[in-house]
Image (cartoon, grey):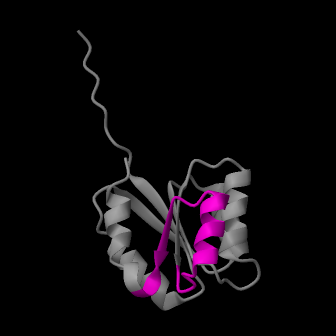
């Protein structure tokens, strides 16, 4: 009789933020999570698109304000390409209108950097 062992795949997480300090802080938090295999980072929309096209990304943390195109534009790109990525918007721009827009565009989570930063590892570790 064959036995099948279902192993949960380690997640590749992409952090997109124009602040190196935020990227480093998130990398330190996320890299310790047991279901995370690697953490990639991008500071711009263009860098993020390149990684999304070259790597298998499972989770993306997007800041709204980036140089060039915004994290909202990146969310649109991810959803238009039907990429199977869990998207967390992590922003200092946690206004209700941004939350509504991100929800409408398909963000899975919307977190305020100033209040919800500690929620990031909890959300990621809960993903299967």
Residue 126 percent across, percent down from the top left: 33, 55
Q: Is residue 28 above or below residue 83?
A: below
Q: Is residue 62 left or right of residue 104?
A: left
Find the magenta span and give its range: 91-114
Q: Visible in this render: residue 44?
A: yes
Residue 107 percent across, percent down from the top left: 57, 61
Q: Is residue 82 above or below residue 86?
A: above
Q: Is residue 107 left or right of residue 77?
A: left
Q: Visible in this render: residue 30?
A: no
Nearer-the-camera pick, 109 or 25:
109
Q: Is residue 6 above or below residue 104?
A: above
Which residue is drawn at the image coordinates 65% and 73% (left, top)?
71
Nearer-the-camera pick, 56 or 117:
117
Which residue is drawn at the image coordinates 52% and 58% (left, top)?
108
Residue furthest to the top in view is 1
In the rendered image, which quarter is residue 1 located in?
top left
Q: Is residue 109 magenta?
A: yes
Which residue is drawn at the image coordinates 45% and 67% (left, top)?
39
Which residue is drawn at the image coordinates 39% and 84% (left, top)?
115
Residue furthest to the front in view is 96
Residue 16 percent across, percent down from the top left: 57, 75
Nearer-the-camera pick, 102 or 74:
102
Residue furthest to the right in view is 68
């Amino acid at each position: 009789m064959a036995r099948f062992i279902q192993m949960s795949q380690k997640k590749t997480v992409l952090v997109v933020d124009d602040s190196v300090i935020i990227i480093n802080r998130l990398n330190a938090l996320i890299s310790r999570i047991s279901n995370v295999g690697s953490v990639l980072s991008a500071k711009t929309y263009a860098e993020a698109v390149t990684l999304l096209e070259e790597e298998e990304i499972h989770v993306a943390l997007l800041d709204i304000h980036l140089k060039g195109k915004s994290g909202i534009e990146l969310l649109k790109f991810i959803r238009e390409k039907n990429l199977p990525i869990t998207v967390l918007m992590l922003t200092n721009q946690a206004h209700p209108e941004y939350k509504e827009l991100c929800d409408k565009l398909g963000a899975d989570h919307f977190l305020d950097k100033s209040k919800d930063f500690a929620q990031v590892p909890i959300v990621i570790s809960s993903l299967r």
